[in-house]
Image (cartoon, rainbow, N blue to C red):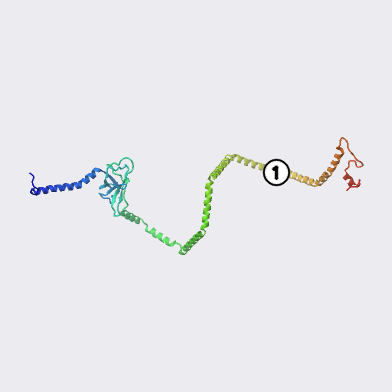
């Protein structure tokens, strides 16, 4: 028989209701965790320090959320960070990890970059040489303090004194700047000519580029000439030696036979002077020989006899005229 609800024991109802609520709350809390652990695998990485990373911070692969940090422990002189990753994400054996800043307020996240072949071993943490941490303000202030402590104040004061003593005269500096301004003005005034010069240089360069084949051929011919001269170097050297020896022998011959050569040259000069003196006689003889030979040809040119007309016989008429032996000469 069914007992009405109002007649049931309120203590029993309270106990059953409490248990039901507790089960629902536990299920709502534990079920997501159970699902998360069922779909993820635990990995670990060694870092120089935690760098502000906290448990529950997200884990990204190529900017995609793929897990979260579960544990942060101290392992000797380094921090061992444990995290769970989605089993569907594949990580290479050379995967690197780095702590990155997510927001300006300093929230961190763990960034993974899959590298290498094979698969990352969950039992072996990512070593320290493949992890990195951000440069924090604390590190910056610490580095600045260390750098400040290493500064040699005495050397710095000496440097400032040297700069003050060796600083250029303001007047000379002003004149130098004024000279630079004038040079700039000259350049601006003649910018067209500068451009024309540059344009001419460009044209020359263009012509050289267009004639590159010819230049290469010319250089090749020059190289061939140089190679030939190198091969003929011994022959050319021997020829130069022979010419030098010949010159020495000629000089020696001239020195040894100088009196004979000078005497011979003197005789040649005498012969030349005699020929010049008798040149007029030769010319007159040739002038008279022509008519005489003509008359002789006229007398003896008819056969094996001679035609002679007295009283002059074979004496030419012009000779008779000169001697005055005939009349009517003109």
Pick the front one: 211 or 75: 211
Q: In this view, does 205 lie above or below 307?
A: below
Direction from residue 127 to residue 187 in the image, left or right: right
Residue 75 shows up from this direction: no
Q: In this view, does 118 lie above or below 202?
A: above
Q: Is mark 1 on a helix, strand or loop?
A: helix
Q: Label 1 belongs to which residue?
A: 254
Q: In this view, does 86 lie above or below 175?
A: above
Residue 246 shows up from this direction: yes
Pick the front one: 121 or 308: 308
Residue 118 x, y percent position in the rendering: 32, 40
Residue 25 x, y percent position in the rendering: 18, 48
Residue 67 x, y percent position in the rendering: 27, 46
Direction from residue 252 to residue 328 in the image, left or right: right
- Give me the residue at 17% from left, 47% from top: 24
Residue 112 x, y percent position in the rendering: 31, 46
Pick the front one: 195 or 53: 195
Image quadrant containing the N terminus: top left
Residue 260 picture quarter:
top right
């Amino acid at each position: 028989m069914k007992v009405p609800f109002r007649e049931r024991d309120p203590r029993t109802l309270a106990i059953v209701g409490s248990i039901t609520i507790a089960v629902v709350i536990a299920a709502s809390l534990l079920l997501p965790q159970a699902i998360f652990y069922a779909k993820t695998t635990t990995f670990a990485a060694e870092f120089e320090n935690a760098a502000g990373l906290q448990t529950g911070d997200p884990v990204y692969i190529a900017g995609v959320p793929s897990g979260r940090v579960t544990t942060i422990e101290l392992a000797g002189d380094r921090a061992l960070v444990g995290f769970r990753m989605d089993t569907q994400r594949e990580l290479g054996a050379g995967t690197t990890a780095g702590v990155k800043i997510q927001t300006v307020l300093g929230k961190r996240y763990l960034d993974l970059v899959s590298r290498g072949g094979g698969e990352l071993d969950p039992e072996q943490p990512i070593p320290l040489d493949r992890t990195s941490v951000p440069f924090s303000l604390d590190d910056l202030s610490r580095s600045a303090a260390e750098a400040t402590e290493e500064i040699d104040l005495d050397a710095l004061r000496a440097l400032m004194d040297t700069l003050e003593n060796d600083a250029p005269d303001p007047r000379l500096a002003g004149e130098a700047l004024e000279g630079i301004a004038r040079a700039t003005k000259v350049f601006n005034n003649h910018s067209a000519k500068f451009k024309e010069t540059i344009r001419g240089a460009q044209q020359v360069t263009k012509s050289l580029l267009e004639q590159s084949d010819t230049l290469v051929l010319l250089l090749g011919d020059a190289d061939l000439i140089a190679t030939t001269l190198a091969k003929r170097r011994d022959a050319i050297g021997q020829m130069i030696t022979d010419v030098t020896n010949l010159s020495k022998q000629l000089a020696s011959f001239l020195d040894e036979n100088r009196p004979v050569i000078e005497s011979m040259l003197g005789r040649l000069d005498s012969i030349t002077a005699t020929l010049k003196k008798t040149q007029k006689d030769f010319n007159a003889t040739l002038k008279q020989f022509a008519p005489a030979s003509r008359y002789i040809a006229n007398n003896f040119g008819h056969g094996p006899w001679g035609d002679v007309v007295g009283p002059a016989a074979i004496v030419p008429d012009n000779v008779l005229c000169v001697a005055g032996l005939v009349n009517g000469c003109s």
